[in-house]
Image (spheres, rainbow, N blue to C red):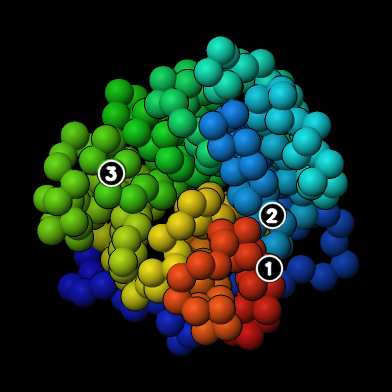
Amino acid sequence: MSDAPTTLDAAWLRDHPLPVHADVDKNSRGRVVLVGGSTLVPGGLRLTAEAALQSGAGKVQLALPEMLAIPLGVLLPEAGMFALPADEDGEIAGTGPVRELISRCDCLAIGPAMGSVDAAGRILDDLLPRATACSVILDAAAVAAGHDRMNLLRELRGRLILTPHAGEMAALTGRDPESLTENRAHVLLRLAEELGAVVMLKGETTMLANPGGELAVYGGGGVGLATGGSGDVLTGIIAGLSARGLDNWQAACWGVWLHGEAGRRLAERHGPMGFLARQLPAETPSLMRGI
């Protein structure tokens, strides 16, 4: 177990390089399946998909409420769309087509742009037992839905990444958000060991832990990242890196750094606040090239 967190910086990244892809097709660069979206945040899954593509994933497929499939398909011609039935609240009500998709994907991400914990829970019940080979990222409502499904999460040992902020972590663990923040290293290490997962707690600084007892910390990309859709972008970056072949620890650490540095760059050009989450993904290719 680490005595102190590792600082995520350029030196760490150079010691943990990204995979090199040469003479490969899009499938060889990794396949991402994203399950999420809702009529409450109809464009949110677009952010996750663009982030996955701009972090290098070869193929990205979106499974989302049927009324969103055509509009997002027009906005995102690079991605495949799989329309799912929706309930009266505009949340995903069934995941049948996704079962076949996840048998051929490298990374499955569930939860971006979803507003209902109940709907996310039904997705977890249906898909997690079938996700037997790919990496799995749970975000937003899907993290909170894990509270009543710890046994399902344990079955993903070695393949799971959790990306909560303090409120979502509180829902998952049943602990008070303030106590989580005050004792975050202990909480993260314990949860990472229990689930065999890479776990982070997002905030002014972001801390990550893995099942081996390692801790890492990133100092944050600035207050401008505290904006709607920013977390959806982070999930997409991590998903793209995971699909490309990075192990879960390196994908999460690289993802946190790329997301934060993208925010730092935008703050330098536009000011500390006011830039949009959808501006973040375009920064990642040059950041990856620069290391």
- Extreme residue toward the top, this view: 88
**Residue count near mark 3 (Cα–Cα under 10 Å), binned few <14, some 14–19, many ≥20:** some
Residue 224 image offset from top left, x and y in percent: 44, 68
Residue at the spot 70% in from the left edge and 62% down from the top edge: 54
Q: Is residue 283 left or right of residue 178?
A: right
Q: Is residue 54 left or right of residue 227?
A: right
Q: Tag on residue 167?
A: 3
Q: Nearer the viewer, residue 125 or 78?
A: 78
Between the residue at mark 2 and the residue at mark 3, the CA separation in whole angstroms equals: 26 Å
In the picture of the structure, the residue carrying the numbered disc 1 is 282
Q: Secondary structure at mark 1?
A: helix
Whether residue 221 is visible, yes or no, is no
Residue 111 image offset from top left, x and y in percent: 50, 36
The amino acid type, in three-letter code, at marker 1 is Ala
Question: Which quadrant would residue 33 be assigned to in this image?
Answer: top right
**Residue count near mark 1 (Cα–Cα under 10 Å), binned few <14, some 14–19, many ≥20:** some
The amino acid type, in three-letter code, at marker 3 is Gly
Q: Is residue 252 above or below residue 63?
A: below
Between the residue at mark 1 and the residue at mark 2, the CA separation in whole angstroms equals: 8 Å
Query: In terms of sequence position, does the residue under pointer 1 or pointer 3 come before the other?
Result: 3
Q: Nearer the viewer, residue 226 or 18?
A: 226
Q: Is residue 218 above or below residue 290?
A: above
Query: In terms of sequence position, does the residue under pointer 1 or pointer 2 come before the other?
Result: 2
